[in-house]
Image (spheres, rainbow, N blue to C red):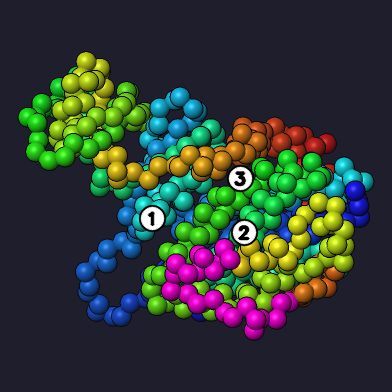
Amino acid sequence: MNTAALIELLYKMADDQLILGHRNSEWTGMGPLLEEDIAFSSMAQDKIGQSHALYQLLHQLGEQEPDTVAFTRNAGQFHNCIFVELPNGEYDFSLIRHFLFDTAEAIRFEMLSRTSYKPLAELSVKIRAELRYHTLHANTWIKQLGSATRESIGRLQHSLEAAMPYALGMFEPSPLEKEIISQGIFEGEVVLRERWMNTVAQVIGQTQLTLPDWKLINPVYGGRSGKHSEHLQPLLDEMSEVFRIDPSAEW
Amino acid sequence: MNSLDPRVNRLPKIGLPGQVEPKVPLDQFGTFEVFVQPKEGKPFQHEGIVHAPNLEMAFVLAKEAFTRRFLCVSLYVVETRNVYVSALTEGNTTAYDFIHFVDQQPGEKVAFEIYHLPKRGKQHQHAGTVYAATPAEAMSEAKKQFGSKLVYNVWTIRTSEIRFTSADEKELWLTLPEKKFRDAADYKGGEKLKEFLERTKA
């Protein structure tokens, strides 16, 4: 198996989960209603747990310890897409990002449950089960608010349009894409993107929201090769603050 | 000034001098009752309520509000107003003494779920299913089946009003047993605090 290709795939997935998990956790204590605050915080915690499991797979492949990998790299060494590092802004943007991202993740891990790399296949079955709730949560909210009031529809529509170029950045092809596909590690970003577009369209079609024309959207790439927005480094500084003060601290 | 914290922005505005107005009702969502099954084969148990705009949202919000810790293999929700409640009793008086037998009611017989409060201060537990045309008839049917039991309260809910977990949604709790870190006991906060105090004293 091409280990370099596998490592590259695992890093981008783990980094996506870690960064979005941290971003979404910023809503803890400030969610729009108590039950939603708990649900969104739990899912943020799931994402960080999923990233931890993926970093453990990387560690088994010779990479450094999960904490070292998560807390000591600079922005340029992260492989997450730019989409997940964008600030939360208002809750409508966080919900739209949650919907677009988790829809992709649910399909990604469903595909990965058939990967030729067995440890990842086993982990994917578990992650897929957690994502089952994440997508149920996202779809229910999008259908609810996407058909509710003029304000809720307008807000979601605005966020959907703002998010879409970044969302397409999730599928930035890897330089090792051919190896990843030919070795049965993953069916590839193009297949994933097609399936994602269909699912997104199917949910949005049940609301009063309008999907932007895919052909007119320019994907925002760069994150996979370490070229990030100005928002990532401050997030990393905050996330690693305790670790940098005391790497042995337990909390 | 707008705060980044939505709760601050929701605070009441400063009023005008001389203002006298009726109190505004609470802008809360309605309530939905949440029932959890901790293990396969165990009865569903009432755990509490969530506020939500509709039944499906209630299901989604109940999942994390009530089953993010501890055991769960299935949950369901129902709008509070669809729960019919008997009189509450105490001591050696069973709630079934306060339920009247009623004649067969006209209309289609449909399924109703029956719940018992086995002890005061505990939660209602699912006891079984009866078929009736009205909630009063369902209570009467429950009395025929379970009337000899000492219970302190009886609930009945029309089965068709319940949002159940579907068979393929059961994977929602697949990884829950691995999330022991969410239990306060697992965190061992007291031990950590003691250790920290001893370390800083030294």
Kindly identify which residue carries mark 2: A102
**Residue B87 appears anywhere in the view:** no
Residue A46 location (% of width, % of height)? 64, 49
Q: B112 left or right of B179?
A: left
Work out which residue is located at the far left of the displayed protein and give it: B103
Span colored in magenta: A198-220
Could you tell me which residue is drawn at 18 percent across and 36 percent down?
A: B109
Could you tell me which residue is drawn at 59 percent across and 72 percent down?
A: A89
Q: Residues within 10 Å of mark 2 (few under 14, many from 20)?
A: many
- From the viewer's side, name the closer residue of A223 and B197: A223
Q: Residues within 10 Å of mark 3 (few under 14, many from 20)?
A: many
* Relative to A24, residue A185 above or below: above
Q: Amino acid at mark 1?
A: Ala
Q: Dot 2 lies on which element?
A: helix
Is A219 magenta? The answer is yes
Kindly identify which residue carries mark 3: A129
Q: Earlier in the sequence, mark 2 or mark 3?
A: 2
**Which disc number belongs to residue B52?**
1
Residue A137 location (% of width, % of height)? 51, 55
Q: CA distance from mark 3 to mark 1?
A: 24 Å
* Relative to A44, residue A164 above or below: below
Q: Dot 1 lies on which element?
A: strand
- From the viewer's side, name the closer residue of A99 and A32: A99
